[in-house]
Amino acid sequence: MAIKIRTINCLLIIFAITGCSIVGIRPYNSNQNIVAPSEITPHSSPTALPDKVYTFLAPFDSLIFENLSLSKNYMYNIFVKLVTPHVGTLTIRIRDPLNRTFDVFESEIYCEPQGGQFFTIPFGTVLDGNYKFTFQMSSENNLNLYIRITRGIPCLHDKISPDEIARTILYRTTCFFDGMLIEHQFFLDTDYSYKFYIGRVSAISSSESSTVWMNYGLTDPDNVFFILFENQSVASVDEISKISFGTSTEGVYTARINIRCEIQYVNIAYAVVRINQISDIVDPNQTQPVPQNETNSQKGTFYLPSEWLISLSIGASIIIVIVIVSYLSRKKR
């Protein structure tokens, strides 16, 4: 009898330990999304930006800001204004941390009696790091030019609503050159509407062709190709191109953007935003009805929760062990 009691106690202890470990198990959910840090929240700019009047000497002079630290994905605005009664031709170039040069401005600039002519030149960044700004002035007289560089909002944030920004699944600012092709892969749900945004964020000098052409295509998980934009010009800095796309299949989609231009480099920002569900996803073609002649022969299936099955299995095992122990004890007597 003592042997039986000790055996039962041991089994109860094992059951308690096993039960605790079972409760602690959490199954892996393959549908869980791993959210990576979004590029839509850029870093802050750590250094002061120019805000001052500078003198340029005739007939040609230049001013260089060698290491202006800028943050990626932000729009920067270059404000220039001639503050002396003269005329000159101003050229502005920007070199990024990878030594890529952008010709963003070239124009005659003059001072009006009512207060002076001014220009604002936008430039959206792709990289964190030190940028070089070069201001070159050609004039017959010495003159003074007011220069101010300010950081604005993140690229496209003035074109996309705050609600859509919160539902952005792809956001990039990329430096393109002529003929460049880039691909992005991302997961889209079925029967959902998505909005695709794309726009140029760096200004182009008037001495160069400002037209930038794009081909923008999307391939679904079944390898079906959709044309979003074909041989279409990319919107200017103050505008944006957008298009809606509804899905019929869930899975990984591949977006391909091809850019053609006559300039050396151009920065383009683009985003994909999740909008809303289109349908209730009811497809009769995917339903498999039961044949009429087999209706009465169908056997019902009863399912128990996995926790119940585990407990019943352990309980049955304990009963079997008790019966065996009792049998052995009686046989020993």
Image: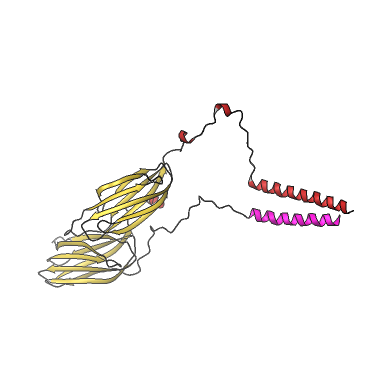
Q: Position of residue 258 (x, y in %)?
A: 29, 53
Q: Position of residue 132 (x, y in %)?
A: 26, 69
Q: Nearer the viewer, residue 125 or 314?
A: 314
Q: Position of residue 33 (x, y in %)?
A: 48, 53
Residue 106 placement: quadrant: bottom left
Magenta highlight: main SS: helix
Position above or below: 293 against 275? above
Based on the picture, tell me whether residue 251 belongs to the magenta stretch. Answer: no
Query: Which colouring convention does the figure follow?
Result: secondary structure
Q: In the visual, does 18 lie left or right of 51? A: right
From this viewpoint, which residue is outermost toward the top? 293
Q: Nearer the viewer, residue 38 or 144?
A: 38
From this viewpoint, which residue is outermost toward the right? 333
The answer to whether residue 116 of the structure is visible from this angle is: no
Q: Nearer the viewer, residue 172 or 228?
A: 228
From this viewpoint, which residue is outermost toward the left? 140
The quarter in which the N terminus is drawn is bottom right
Q: In the visual, does 295 lie left or right of 15? A: left
Based on the picture, tell me whether residue 9 belongs to the magenta stretch. Answer: yes
Q: Which residue is painted at 61% across and 29% down in the image?
A: 297
- Total numbered labels placed on residues in the image: 0
Q: In the visual, does 28 lie left or right of 315? A: left
Q: In the visual, does 226 lie left or right of 105? A: right
Q: Nearer the viewer, residue 189 or 240?
A: 189
Which residues are drawn in magenta?
Answer: 1-27
Q: Position of residue 40 (x, y in %)?
A: 38, 57
